[in-house]
Amino acid sequence: MKNPTGLTVHSKSRILEVAFDDGASFNIPFELLRVYSPSAEVKGHGPGQEILQVGQRDVGISALDPVGNYAVKPTFTDGHNSGLFTWDYLYKLGAEQEQLWADYLARLHAAGFEGDSGREPGTVLPSAPKAHGCGHKH
């Protein structure tokens, strides 16, 4: 497991800077963190249950709380705060962010958004299901 040696929230540029003990350092956009949150609200409860996150271009982080010695829990400015980002997951997001961005844009296009229009604040899914929850408390 890689361990962080530094975590810096850059609110103005909306970047989380993370340095690791192996010398790697990543600048991870808040939007990438938000759309790839490891929470059940985003990932669902199993494969194929993922919920495409839209309208997150300008999302911020209002708090970043430690969870033991293994993770942080960000509170995003849209109210989302149920994802625990382990050090390994932050490393993965940083190391693979180019591919993750490409995958995210491909999923937006598949949902009917042109270009990166699905990233604009206020965007909603074209056929957004009615909110009825999954029966679990998150």
Image (cartoon, rainbow, N blue to C red):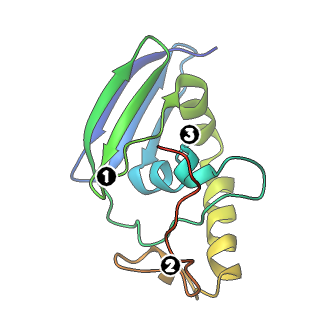
**Whole-number angstrom distance, CA of label 3 to CA of label 2:** 22 Å
Q: Secondary structure at mark 2?
A: helix
Name which residue type carries label 1.
Arg
User: Which residue type carries mark 3?
Assistant: Gly
Horizontal relation, residue 47 to residue 80: left or right? right
> Label 1, on which residue?
14
Between disc 1 and disc 3, whose residue precedes? Answer: 1
Judging depth in this view, the residue of 126 and 6 nearest the camera is: 126
Where residue 33 sits: x, y (%)? 47, 48
The answer to whether the residue labelled 3 contacts the one labelled 2, judged by CB atoms less than 8 Å apart, is no
Which residue carries the number 2 mark?
Answer: 118
**Other residues around mark 1 within 10 Å, as few (<14) / some (14–19) / many (≥20):** some
The three-letter code of the residue at mark 2 reads: Gly
Residue 79 left/right relative to 50: left
Q: Position of residue 80 (x, y in %)?
A: 37, 51
In the rendered view, would you say 7 is above or below 16? above
Rendered image: mark on residue 94: 3
Along the polypeptide, which appears first: circle 2 or circle 1? 1
Crowdedness near tag 2: few (<14), some (14–19) or many (≥20) residues, C-alpha within 10 Å? many
Q: Secondary structure at mark 1?
A: loop
Query: Is residue 107 visible in this depiction of the protein?
Result: yes
Dot 3: few (<14), some (14–19), or many (≥20) neighbours within 10 Å? many
Query: Disc 2 and disc 1: Cα gap in Å?
Result: 18 Å
